[in-house]
Image (cartoon, grey):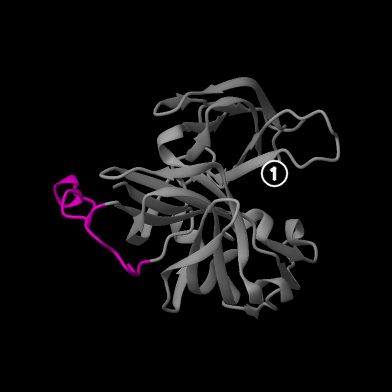
Amino acid sequence: MKKIGIALTTIVFGILLMVACNDDSQTTNFPEGKGKVNVYLTDAPFPIDLVSQTIVTIDRVEIRKQENDTTEASFITIMEEPFEIDLLSLSNGITEQLASVELEAGTYDMMRLHVVDAEVILTDETVFDLKIPSGSSSGLKIKIEPALTINSGETSDVLLDFDVSKSFVAKGNWKGGTINGFNFKPVVRCVLLDRAGRIVGTVSDTSNVVLPNTAVNLWTEVNDIEEDSLITTAFTDEMGAYQLIGIPEGTYYMIAEQDSFLTDTIWNVDVLKGESTQIDFMLTPEP
C-alpha cells in the first residue's frame, strides 16, 4: 500500500487533523491493498506589509478515485472537522500535515476542499469578513496532474499550494497603503512531491543589503498570451531569503519585484525533481 501525503504550502495550520505517523515502520501495518495519504498546506503571500493574517476555515477535504468505464468516480472524505488556517504562517517552504489516511490502492485524480469562512486582518487590526463564492458550497475542485497512483505498501505525499496572492484580491489603492476590502476566490494547485523540486535564494540590492518583503514570482512560458502562466509567488523574509517548494520538473522564468527598485527577470530556470535550484536576485534602485 502507498502512503500519500497531502501538503498545503505557505498555508499551514497549527492544527493536525486525522494525522497518522509518517514512519515507514508503520506502513507495513496497513491492511492488505491499502495505502496512506498525508495532507499538507502551504501558500503564497501578497500585500504582506499591510496584512497580518489571512484566515480560512475548511470543514471537509475529499479525494476522488478513478473507476472503470462502468463505475462512476466518487469522492472519499479524508478529513471532516472544521479547522482554521492562517495562510501567512506557511510562507517560504513551511508546510503542515493536514491529514494522513489509509486509501485503497488505485488512481486518484482530484481533490475537493470545502471552504466555509475567510477573513483578512490588517496590521492596524482592521478585520474584513469575506464572502465565500457560491461555487464553494459544493467544494473547490483541484485536479491532481499527473494523477496519483497508490500502490500497495508505498507512501506518497501531495502538496496543496493555496495561492494567497490570487485568492485574496485587495480592493483600493493598496500600493498606496489603502485597503478597502478583499474579493475572495480560492486558488489552489496540487503537486505530487516525489515529482517536484524546489527553488531557494535571496534578494538584495546593489549594495548587498538584503530586501525583505520582495515578491518573487515563478512563471512558465506559454503560447497563448491570455493564458495565466504564473505558477506561484513567495515573499522574502526579514533576511531577504525565499523558498518555493512543490515545483514540477521543467524550465521557468522568475521575476523579483520591490517598490523603489527596478524589476529583475531571470530566464531559463531549470528545476529537477528531488533537487534544489539556487536563484539569487540583485535589484537596482530606481533612478
Q: Residue 280's x, y, as percent?
A: 52, 26
Q: Residues within 10 Å of mark 1 (few under 14, many from 20)?
A: few
Q: Residue 181's x, y, as percent?
A: 73, 73
Q: Residue 124's x, y, as percent?
A: 59, 74
Q: Residue at x 54, y 71 (%)?
A: 56
Nearest the camera: 16 or 78?
Answer: 78
Up/down of 277 relative to 158, above or below: above
- Residue 171 lies in quadrant: bottom right
- Residue 282 lies in quadrant: top right
Q: How many labels does the image show?
A: 1
| Residue found at the very far front of the displayed protein | 70
Residue that carries the numbered disc 1 in the rendered image:
259
Asked if the magenta segment contains residue 187, the reply would be no
Left or right: residue 85 compared with residue 126: left
Q: In which quarter of the image is the C terminus?
A: top right
Nearest the camera: 44 or 173?
Answer: 44
Up/down of 55 relative to 192, above or below: below
Up/down of 254 relative to 115, above or below: above
Up/down of 243 relative to 164, above or below: above
Q: Is residue 50 visible?
A: no
Look at the image and give the residue range highlighted in magenta. Answer: 14-32
Q: Residue 206's x, y, as percent?
A: 59, 25
- Residue 40 lies in quadrant: bottom left
Left or right: residue 41 compared with residue 183: left
Q: Residue at x 62, y 60 (%)?
A: 141
Left or right: residue 77 compared with residue 130: left
Question: SS of the residue at dot 1?
Answer: loop
Q: Which residue is drawn at 43% across and 60% down?
A: 12
Q: Can residue 248 be seen in this view?
A: yes
